[in-house]
Structures are given as C-alpha cells and as structure tokens.
Amino acid sequence: MNKSEKIAWLYMIEEGDVVSKWSYYAGAWDILPDESDECREGIKTIGINWSKSSPVTGDNESVFAGTFHDSDTVSVTSGKLVLNDGRKFKWGISEALDLTKVMLFVLSKSDIDLTYDGVEIT
C-alpha cells in the first residue's frame, strides 16, 4: 500500500469507526464503538498488516427517503483493515471523503513529508 493510501487510512482511523453494515433506514453505518476502540488499541500494540488490508474506497449506498418516494443515494467511504495478528475490521465513514478535510488533516500532521518530484512543497 502506498503512502497516500496509508494517509487515507490514518484519516479513516481517526475520523471513522469500525462498522458492521449499512443501515438503509438510518442512512448511516451501524457503528461498533467497542470494536473501534479494540482496533485502535491493536494498531498501537500489534500493528497493521498492509498487504492484507484493502485501500479506503468510496461507494454509493441507498437511503430511505420516505414511504412514497424513491430511495436517495449517498456517497460513503469504507475499507478493511487487518492487524498483524490476523484480526479484520471493516471501517466506515457515512460520507464521501472531502478533499479539503483530508488536506487539512494531512497538514495538521507535522511528521508527513510533503514533497513533489523531490521538492518540498510546504
């Protein structure tokens, strides 16, 4: 997994949650807070198996818009993270990744090397 995919995962870990499935009626992921905490702790103590984890991806999900209406579609973000001990966690954010939010997040991290073609762009 390349550095940009890892940065997307860092954003997902800090801003998202471990989820079970998409809830059509709630229009959001079913969040598993205890598993989110468990995974975050495992990341710190065990580490991430990047070769078995999937990239963070965007998708569309249907949401209930009322009894006499067609369903609406929303953009969501999700991915599968695997720890070095083999435990698997599905992460989700109930919205599309907003490029501006992600860039502000990246810029708030002082340890990320921001270069383009060998030239520092900070």
Image: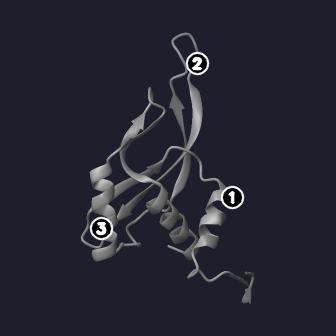
Residue 46 visible in the snapshot:
no
Residue 67 x/y as whole percent: 51, 12
Q: Which residue is mark 2?
A: 70
Q: Residue 79: which quarter of the image?
A: bottom left
CA separation in Å, label 3 and label 1? 28 Å
As drawn, 28 above or below 122: above
Nearer the camera: disc 2 or disc 3? 3
Front in this rendered view, residue 51 or 112: 112
**Badge 2 or badge 3: first in the primary sequence:** 3
Q: Name the amino acid type tagged 3.
A: Glu
Residue with the most extreme top position: 68
Q: Earlier in the sequence, mark 2 or mark 1?
A: 2
Q: Nearer the viewer, residue 22 or 10?
A: 10
107 in relation to 38, above or below: below
- What residue is rendered at 54% in x and 75% in y? 2
Mark 1 lies on residue: 100
Distance from label 2 to label 3 (Cα)?
41 Å
Rendering quarter of residue 107: bottom right
Of helix, strand and loop, which one carries label 1? helix
Q: Residue furthest bottom?
A: 118
Instruction: Name the amino acid, label 1.
Output: Thr
Disc 3 vs disc 1: Cβ atoms closer than 8 Å?
no
What residue sits 52% from the left and 28% below the top?
63
Residue 2 appears in view: yes
| Mark 2, secondary structure of its residue | loop
In the image, is 9 to the left or to the right of 119? Answer: left
Q: Which residue is mark 3?
A: 41
Residue 77 x, y percent position in the rendering: 52, 50
Secondary structure under tag 3 reads: helix
